[in-house]
């Protein structure tokens, strides 16, 4: 079964008026990774689709969704798939890719149906595309690693970039994940915004009884959303996107918009945060 849901773009003055339920309704994505299902959430921020597929030993095919208005899902889109479960197979254009936990399969525009099988837990990210870049399995060895932060500020981490111009060219999808050194719990602090690109986070590998406090909003009007394991959050282009965990976790970040320049960000000075 494939379930689609649409999230409209909310402007900063409206976001400021939202209570906990309102913030969660617009930005928080739960219910992903249901066994035997493909789930898709269509965001109007840069038309990014955030979703999941859990074949549970069977095969799930991503081929069409009414939300895109095209016959085939990938007719005018590209797709990044991160496996956060067991090693599993994905078949595209008669090629079977064995995707291990922590690897990313990029599927280019026009590649046709995507068949996912086995016991993988696939996190799906898709954005509109103008060019057919090749489908490619990107392993940890191929990915680019950027070390950030320090133990003293509880944010020592490595940003592992999979869909990045220096690793594999895409139309607009930038994607990877961030892992922490033991004891470090803060991501993306000091905070930043990038009005040219929206971003989505998936928090995972978080114990069931732990939470990440995810911060969003304009820097001078911040709000928080409490995140459990395998939940995603949509970050509008005008919003900070930072979090602190009560336990250890990993998070997948993905961006889309006007450029694919990872380091193009406007840093927010601590004194500007409210
Ligand atoms: O740990 C971090 O810091 C990040 O991973 C930051 C995100 O990748 C990001 O916000 C990129 O714009
Ligand atoms: Zn960012």
Image (spheres, rainbow, N blue to C red):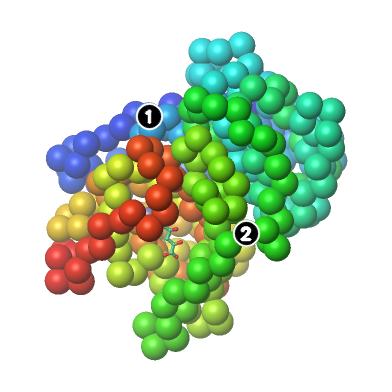
Most foreground residue, 199 or 2: 199
Tag 2 residue: 143
Rendered-image quadrant of the N terminus = top right
Sequence-wise, the earlier of marks 1 and 2 is 1
Determine whether the beta carbon of the residue marked 2 sits less than 8 angstroms from the nearest atom of ligand 1: no
Judge left or right: residue 174 versus residue 265: right
- Nearest the eye: 120 or 78: 78
Residue 215 appears left or right of 133: left
Judge left or right: residue 204 versus residue 261.
right
Residue 177 lies, in percent from the top left, at 55, 59
User: Residue 139 falls in which quadrant of the image?
Assistant: bottom right
Splitting the image into 4 quarters, where does residue 131 fall?
top right
Q: Residue at the spot x=50%, y=41% of the render? A: 173
Location of the C terminus (image quadrant): bottom left
**Percent coordinates x, y for residue 196 in the rendering:** 30, 42
Q: Is 83 rendered above or below residue 44?
A: below
SS at circle 1: loop
């Amino acid at each position: 079964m494939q379930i689609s849901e649409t999230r409209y773009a909310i402007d900063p003055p409206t976001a400021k008026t939202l209570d906990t339920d309102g913030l969660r309704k617009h930005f928080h994505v739960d219910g992903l990774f249901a066994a035997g299902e493909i789930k898709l959430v269509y965001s109007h921020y840069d038309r990014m689709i955030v979703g999941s597929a859990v074949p549970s030993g069977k095969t799930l095919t991503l081929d069409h969704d009414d939300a895109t208005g095209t016959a085939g899902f990938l007719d005018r889109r590209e797709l990044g798939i991160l496996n956060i479960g067991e090693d599993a197979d994905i078949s595209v254009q008669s090629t079977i890719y064995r995707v291990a936990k922590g690897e990313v399969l990029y599927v280019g525009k026009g590649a046709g149906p995507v068949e996912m099988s086995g016991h993988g837990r696939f996190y799906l990210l898709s954005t509109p595309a103008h060019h057919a870049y090749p489908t490619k399995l990107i392993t940890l060895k191929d990915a680019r690693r950027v070390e950030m932060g320090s133990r003293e500020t509880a944010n020592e981490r490595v940003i592992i970039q999979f869909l990045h111009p220096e690793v594999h060219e895409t139309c607009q999808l930038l994607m990877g994940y961030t892992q922490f050194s033991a004891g470090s719990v803060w991501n993306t602090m000091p905070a930043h915004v990038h009005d040219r690109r929206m971003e989505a986070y998936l928090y995972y590998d978080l114990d069931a009884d732990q939470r990440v406090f995810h911060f969003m909003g304009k820097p001078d009007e911040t709000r928080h959303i409490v995140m459990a394991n395998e939940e995603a959050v949509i970050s509008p282009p005008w919003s900070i996107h930072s979090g602190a965990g009560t336990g250890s976790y990993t998070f997948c970040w993905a961006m889309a918009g006007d450029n694919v320049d990872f380091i193009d960000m406007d840093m927010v000075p601590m004194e500007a945060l409210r």
